[in-house]
Image (tube, rainbow, N blue to C red):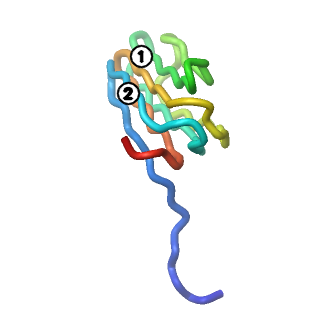
């Protein structure tokens, strides 16, 4: 142990309520997605890679924070979409725009 504090970090992209954002490119790495739902009846979140949906939380998902570990290499750009009172944070290594 060197005694040097070197935290484990990845960059991330935050997509707020009722927003869609596309980022990254083929060969990027998606480590995880963290979804915060503040109002269950009107919030959902979807993550797609290269046009294929990787996961989707439906509108009736209870309030809370959901941590989805993905660990995948992308085959295209990443699109994160939220509706209502949901926020999705996508963590990984992404090609700058």
Which quadrant, please, contains the C terminus? top left
x and y, in percent, of residue 61 in the image? 53, 17
Residue positioned most to the bottom? 2
Give the number of the disc on residue 43. 1
Relative to 59, does residue 1 appear above or below in the rendering? below
Which quadrant, please, contains the N terminus? bottom right
Relative to 90, does residue 7 appear above or below in the rendering? below
**Measuring 56% from the left and 30% from the top, which residue is drawn there?**
76
Residue highlighted by disc 2: 21
Which is more toward the observer, 85 or 52? 52
Q: Residues within 10 Å of mark 1 (few under 14, many from 20)?
A: many
x and y, in percent, of residue 95 in the image? 46, 45
Give the number of the disc on residue 71. none
Q: Residues within 10 Å of mark 2 (few under 14, many from 20)?
A: some
Q: Is residue 36 left or right of residue 53?
A: left
x and y, in percent, of residue 12 in the image? 44, 46
Per the model, the C-alpha gap separating discs 2 and 1 is 16 Å
> The residue tagged with tag 2: helix, strand or loop?
strand
- Looking at the image, how many numbered discs can be counted on the residues? 2
> The residue tagged with tag 1: helix, strand or loop?
loop
- Label 2 or label 1, whichever lies nearer to me, is 2
x and y, in percent, of residue 90 in the image? 48, 39
Asked whether the beta carbons under mark 2 and mark 1 sit within 8 Å of each other, the answer is no
Which is more toward the observer, 34 or 28? 28
Which is more toward the observer, 61 or 27? 27
């Amino acid at each position: 142990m060197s005694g040097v504090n070197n935290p484990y970090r990845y960059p991330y992209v935050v997509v707020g309520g009722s927003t869609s954002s596309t980022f990254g490119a083929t060969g990027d790495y998606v480590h995880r997605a963290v979804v915060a739902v503040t109002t269950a009846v009107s919030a959902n979140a979807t993550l797609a890679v290269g046009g294929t949906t990787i996961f989707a939380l439906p509108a009736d998902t209870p309030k809370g924070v959901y941590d989805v570990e993905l660990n995948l290499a992308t085959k295209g750009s990443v699109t994160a979409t939220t509706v209502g009172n949901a926020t999705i944070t996508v963590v990984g290594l992404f090609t700058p725009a």
